[in-house]
Amino acid sequence: MFINFFFTLKSYGVPVSIHEWMILHHALSLNLNNCSLTDFYHIAKSILVKHEIHFDKYDLAFLDTFKDIETTDEMLEEILAGLKKVKELHLTEEEKKQIEQLNLDEILKNFEEQLKAGHYKDHVGGNKAIGTGGRSTQGAWGYNPAGIRIGQGESRHHRAVQIAEKRTFRNYSSDITLDTRQMKVALSHLRSLLPIGMGERLNIDETIDATCKNAGEIEFVWENKDKKASKVMLIMDVGGSMTPYAELASRLFSAASSQISRFKHYYFHNCIYQELWTDIERNKTISSHDLLRSEDNDYKVIIVGDGEMAPSELTWVNGAIDYWYHNDTPGIVWLQRFKDKFKNIIWLNPIPARSWNYVQTIRMIRGIFPMFELTLDGLDESVKYLMSGKCELYHH
Amino acid sequence: MNYFKGSDEYVLSQALRDNVNVSIALERPLIVKGEPGTGKTLLAHSIAKGLGKELIIWNIKSTTKAKEGLYVYDTVQRLNDARFGDGNVSDIKRYIKLGKLGEAFKSEEQVVLLIDEIDKAELEFPNDLLNELDEMSFYIPETGENIKAVHRPIMIITSNSEKELPDPFLRRCIFHYIEFPDTELMEEIIKVHYPKIEKNLLREALKRFYWIREFDMLRKKPSTSELIDWLQALMVGGISAKSIEKEIPFIGTLLKKKEDVDLVEKSGKSHYAYSTSMRTRDVY
């Protein structure tokens, strides 16, 4: 039984349901997997896993469950390892007929005997044992229609465990910090920030007018529904350890911006003080005071930063990391002001959540903003939070 | 039983072929996802051809409603007819037009139904089809008619993952993610399109193509269809395999954004360390 595979999948975070588990068993009862573990690997994957971000977790769970399993796939490979290719055999029609008369039971019996006797090692030619190019009933590249074909499939006999071990889909996993490879996927997660549906609406007045003008023949006038406005403001930490993420995040959001009715972005270094930069090179500035005063408070504000700094940068007057920069209000006060102004505001952090508790300044920032990881899961949660005010981690 | 082996002009991986057959055997829709240009839509065409069945295509747009796939009740036509007295208005059946799903259900022969780019529609769209997919039938209240599938259609659904699909819908489907073809599979694909292509040219071009695809910073990675265009340009232009080693002729057919072209051309000229740092962005 492999019911533990189901629970292993669940514990690795693959959302499998009983419904899908039953479908898998239906597939197995039809022997769609051809009694092969490799085919089972693919079939179970296509039935149980419905998103490529879970493929890697599936691979891990598969390894965990089936790592030490003995399969016929394995046995076949062992046999094949001992075989060497020889020239293909050309038989006369008579000989072919003779061979065709052998029946499958005999062949299987013979196969087992040979296996037990250990004859499969380095055998070439011959009439009985496993070999290549012979007339025996087992082996590759030989001639026998009733024989057991082994090792001629292209990808079929990759051992399933080895395929799982490759973990090709590691980069699609949803809990690793985002990089450009997942840009497209990340974008799709951000879509829920966007207005939902354009839809058409019947303009009744215009329709009556047009129908009258048309001498009673009905003429419809449609108009577009109002687009739901969504305003997004992105405030990003640039410089130092954040540089690689800053460009990524700005590209991510600006790509989505074409569909957001208003999109603004600002930059800071480590912490927000009285000024924000409007360009990533930090040349032009805008006063934070003005920004707080002039902007609408219904922006969805996303702050991206690692929040890792000296506590003094957060709490001291003149604590800013740039020695030439003087701030007469501590950074934490500025952060609080942003929080007070904007109802929907969150912090995205490229540092994995498990280490947040070890950094004092991150703990302090989390006291102000709901913080999410800069991963696909984190993006999902944060967008949910921004749109509805609640998610699994935080509630208003 | 239907067994799909592939067709001449469509090369596919073993895993995908197996999944198609699993989906046929289990009578469940197959969802195909993957990068643009990996041949998601063509798969349905190939299945229809390979199995000798009719193909019905339902193209989804952002405004498509689930009900349109079942049937449309043309009230406007009926109103018009009532006003100007054309035909028998009391016969509502005349104004019920079956949608693509309805057509597929009603067909006497089993058909292949392609629901193309399902993610374009609104989020609730797939959920609205759950019952119809389970029961393979639907009810038309206007006429009291019950349309039941004569044969379960073989259903292929493609998605570009612009939106996530709802879980209850996914639970009922088989899922396949088309990975970008590796060099070997790609060679096979190219040979289907250009059987006479010169070996050296193909080898060098593929080397270049995969080299370009490794740039993580690209805004739009070139896909199979762009590679095919590029190869044609190379062949028509009489470009030799040697010259591809030095430069990339007709780069515009591969890369459609100016920033991408700049990026690739710049890295070709600079020294190794710089170009690798442009290509990957691993952070330590």
Image (cartoon, coloured by chain):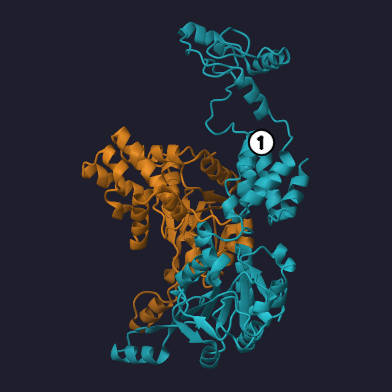
Report x, y in % for residue B16.
Answer: 52, 43
Q: Which residue is mark 1?
A: A37
Which quadrant of the structure image shows residue A71? top right
Report x, y in % for residue A70.
Answer: 72, 31
Chain that bears disc 1:
A
Look at the image and tell me in which quarter the C terminus of chain A lies.
bottom right
Chain given the colour cyan: A
| Secondary structure at numbered mark 1 | helix
Residue B255 visible in image: no
* Chain B: drawing colour: orange
- Is A257 displayed left or right of A32 in the figure? left
Relative to A280, residue B17 above or below: above
Which quadrant of the structure image shows residue A217? bottom left
Report x, y in % for residue A247.
Answer: 49, 67
The residue nearer to you, when weighing A67 against A88, is A67
- Is A58 displayed left or right of B175 in the figure? right
Look at the image and tell me in which quarter the N terminus of chain A lies.
top right
Q: Residue furthest left?
A: B237
Q: Amino acid at mark 1?
A: Leu
Mark 1, residues whose alpha carbon is within 10 Å: few (<14), some, or many (≥20)? many
